[in-house]
Amino acid sequence: MTAATTPLHYLSVADAASALSAGRISSAELTEAVIARAEAVEPRLRAFLSADPALARSQAQASDARRAAGGCRGPLDGIPIGLKDVIAARDQPLTAGSRMLEKFVSPYDATVTGRLREAGAVLYGRHNCDEFAMGSSTENSAFHPTGNPWALDRVPGGSSGGSAAALAAGEAVATLGSDTGGSIRQPAALCGVVGLKPTYGRVSRYGLVAYASSLDQIGPFGRTVEDVALVLQTIAGHDERDSTSVGAPAEDFAAALTAPSAPRRLGLPREYFGEGLDPEVAAAVEQAVSYYRELGCEVREVSLPHTPYCLDTYYVLATAEASSNLARYDGIRYGHRCAEPRDLHDLYFRSRAEGFGAEVKRRIILGTYVLSSGYYDAYYLRAQKVRTLVRRDFLRAFEQVDALLTPTSPIPAFRRGEKADPLAMYLCDIYTIGVNLAGLPALSIPCGFNRAGLPVGFQLIGKPLGESELLAIAHAYDRAHQWGRRHPNL
Amino acid sequence: MDRSELDLDALARLARLALTPEEKATFTRQLAELLGHIDRLSQVDVSGVEPSAHAHPQHNVWQDDKARPGLPPAEALRNAPAQRDQMIVVPKVVE
């Protein structure tokens, strides 16, 4: 479908930006189309936890007025962008998918939200997610599940499932999610869109509800690799309000997409193509590999020998950090407080019991255990050492290749309720977790559909702060295939 | 690793979580299963390996010691479950 015949709510950021700058459409029209689309599909899809159409309309009008006065702020000016409900926007709800924060209203903007505002984006839609971003299906939301736009009885992935589903369904032109163990890349794969987890520290976490702070990272979803590059260059860059923010300035990632360069060397980690990988997913990923070979890339097998330990390392470190981070929800300063507490202890114990769902409690308890006296060395300290080994594996592989290519998820979208066992759900993230442990940039790019019509994605993993090269490699495939521009029949 | 001493009451106390008997039973079973998986970490040779708290080595990061505007009291208290005279109300702490 050409840009001229694409419904407005399915335009890419780049196409919408050129239509806006040519005066073919206004931000008001584009925003109205996205709002109308959301009103049409939300009763079935349920990707939103809240939305403020009136505020979006006023931001769109302001954008049109700016543009008419010659003050356009760049490619995101007037573009409707939605946020996962773990990213603060001043005066808007911020629930993190939890009863604990059901009535919370943000007193300030996250740094990424502020940067989107400065770029003129129209903020519309706060997206459903697993509670406190803990999950791989969005079923852990305390409020309701979200459907997969390609099959409503299936999950959109998680934890940023609402942000992936909203984009795939045309309820936004781009969205932001967060990724601690795969929470951007896995839902991107399951919903047929592009999702990027930047290098740890590339994007400020100020104003992001904390889950596991040494792993959490905010990143964009888009229909194309070009779109995620455009959003990344707006939200990236140093922020003194996040002490883990790296000093590297935001680059012109979009310009780097088409920069001429030598054919790249791609590595296929053999540990990522073994048992548990769905054959149709494997076949679609294999076709993407073949395309890179046709482009003249050198493809070779590499090994990341500590891969079998990534999941265990992650569940020690992430739950330990979560048990500490979530101690702030004590029913005192904000968040849920139980009725008629007998004393301070009763207030803590019951407020937390009533405010948190099962998965959050499970992770807090596990995190408390691995940090507790007598177990700290055996679990937490040991996991931190294995983390060092996992990162070394990746850095050694990058001595031979420019990027690693893997499946994003071992399976396509599964049915709601299918993975009731926690360990079965955790295994959904086996190909994405190592990247978080090592702090690397990685993205999921759609590479086709299985016979049941469910999207499949592959993952490209890059060197630390190597987003420009990573995005260029991803773009070489994406511009020739454009799977993310296909629309679900919804 | 011996899991016989997996004491959910003690863990719930440390985590300030009131758990129902059903939750305790479920979590005990699930934690034993998860820890059984996690115990595979003991197979890794980590001798001489430095632990990583973060993916990238991070050392002290300082901010300039400058006063700057913060949230006004009404904004800071906006989400407080109970408040009076610009203060958060809590149950009596000292008898």
Image: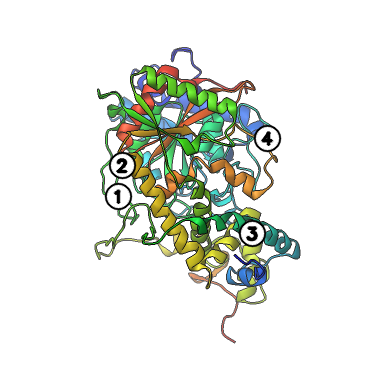
The extreme bottom residue here reads B95
Q: Which mark is residue A246?
A: 1
Element type at mark 4: loop
Q: How much space separates mark 3 and mark 2, taking CA atoms? A: 37 Å
Position in image of residue A287 (x %, y %)? 48, 21
| Mark 2 secondary-structure assignment | loop
* Camera-nearest residue between A438 and A298: A298
The image shows residue A114, relative to residue A12, as above or below, that is below
- Distance from Cα at disc 4 to Cα at disc 1: 39 Å
> Looking at the picture, how far across and down is residue B3, in whole percent?
64, 66
In the image, taking residue A221 as reference, residue A335 lies left or right, namely right
Could you say which disc has been placed on residue B31 in the image?
Answer: 3
- In the depicted structure, whether residue A82 falls above or below residue B63: above
Query: Depth-wise, is mark 1 or mark 2 nearer the camera?
Result: 2
Q: Is residue A280 visible?
A: yes
- Using the image as rendered, state which of residue A246 and residue A319 is in the foreground: A319
Q: CA distance from mark 3 to mark 1?
A: 36 Å
Q: Are marks 3 and 2 in contact (CB under 8 Å)?
A: no
Mark found first going from the N terminus, 1 or 2: 1
Report the Cα–Cα distance between label 2 and label 4: 36 Å
